[in-house]
Image: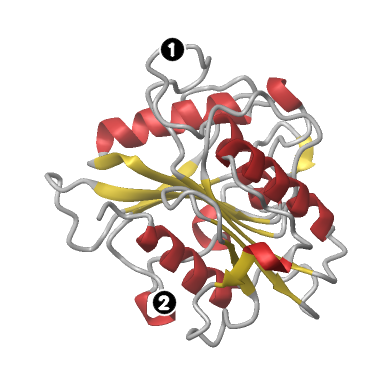
Amino acid sequence: GNVPTKAGPRTFWVRVPRDYDPNHKYRTVYIGQGCGGYEAANTSTYQFYREDQGGTDEAIYVAIDIPKDMANQDCYDNRDGPSSQEWEAFELFHNVVDSTYCIDKDRVYISGYSTGGWLANMWGCYFGGGIDTTKARLFAPCYHIRGQAAVTGGEPTEQPTCNGPVAAIWIHDKNDNGNQISGNINALTRVGKTNGCPTNYEDQSIQELWHPEEPLLNNICKKFKNCPADYPVIFCTTEGLGHADQKERATVAFTKFFDELEPK
């Protein structure tokens, strides 16, 4: 955590399973917090390991703090486009995580709430598409993000070139005044183009209910039917919750989403 990035030292927190086995390759989930609270990500991000709330302990979770340099006030650096420090930050974080813990390089995910949702959209774009064997990608060419998951957030106006398909899920409230739902609809459109499938938010004919048996997700989460099986795309729309983190719904939805991406 003391390796300086473009903007100086960044901190992150790692939680491993209670029965962690150094010879077993684990799913790894990065978790972005909301704005504010320096060096507090270990308590201000989703606690996906809570099995009593629909999570799973059998994964490595990496909670990442916001930068201290005020590049975007007290949020992640999601306004600087290709010059954002967050590209380099992922490489430096993941170099440490990969060298310290037993991770599965094909099961690395990014999730987040609010500014962490913006970060999920950023990393899902730039680090999607698998390992870059040509080393054309400047940052972390030997790693990739398998799937992105966000509650609220938005799509940066200036993304770098997206590097390939990514599985994606969003949860966004119609009445969110902190981040307008249109931002993640733009992210949905971007993922559809990258994944090669239609993802028109308004077109109900290309959507189907996702996990209608789950009370927290029924009639809220829709899966786009024509997207590749390896890169599913899901959008969950709530109403009347505003800018809430929806942690109960996110824990259930994101855990199911990651589980379904596991190798068969």
Disc marking residue 135: 1
Which residue does the image show at 74% across and 43% down from the upper left? 155
Relative to 35, say whether 128 is above or below.
Answer: above
Q: What residue type is disc 1 on?
A: Lys
**Image quadrant assignment for residue 191:** top right
Mark 2: give few (<14), some (14-19) or many (20+) Cα within 10 Å: some
The image position of residue 236, as x and y in percent, is 65, 68
Could you say which is closer to the camera, residue 197 or residue 106? 197
Q: Is 135 displayed left or right of 87 in the figure?
A: left
Mark 1: give few (<14), some (14-19) or many (20+) Cα within 10 Å: few
Could you tell me if residue 141 is visible in this image? Answer: yes
Q: What residue does disc 2 label?
A: 54
In the orientation shown, which residue stands out farthest toward the left? Answer: 23
Q: Is 228 displayed left or right of 176 in the figure?
A: left
Could you say which is closer to the camera, residue 194 or residue 238? 194
Earlier in the chain: of badge 1 and badge 2, it is 2
The image position of residue 226, as x and y in percent, is 55, 54
Disc marking residue 171: none
Which residue does the image show at 57% across and 79% down from the upper left? 217
Q: What residue type is disc 2 on?
A: Gly
The image position of residue 210, as x and y in percent, is 53, 72
Relative to 44, say whether 3 is above or below.
Answer: above
Quadrant in the picture for the N terminus:
top left
Quadrant in the picture for the C terminus:
bottom left
Element assignment for label 2: loop
Which residue does the image show at 82% across and 70% down from the upper left? 174
Element assignment for label 1: loop
**Can you tell which of label 1 and label 2 is closer to the viewer?**
1
Could you tell me if residue 1 is visible in this image? Answer: no
The image position of residue 115, as x and y in percent, is 70, 49
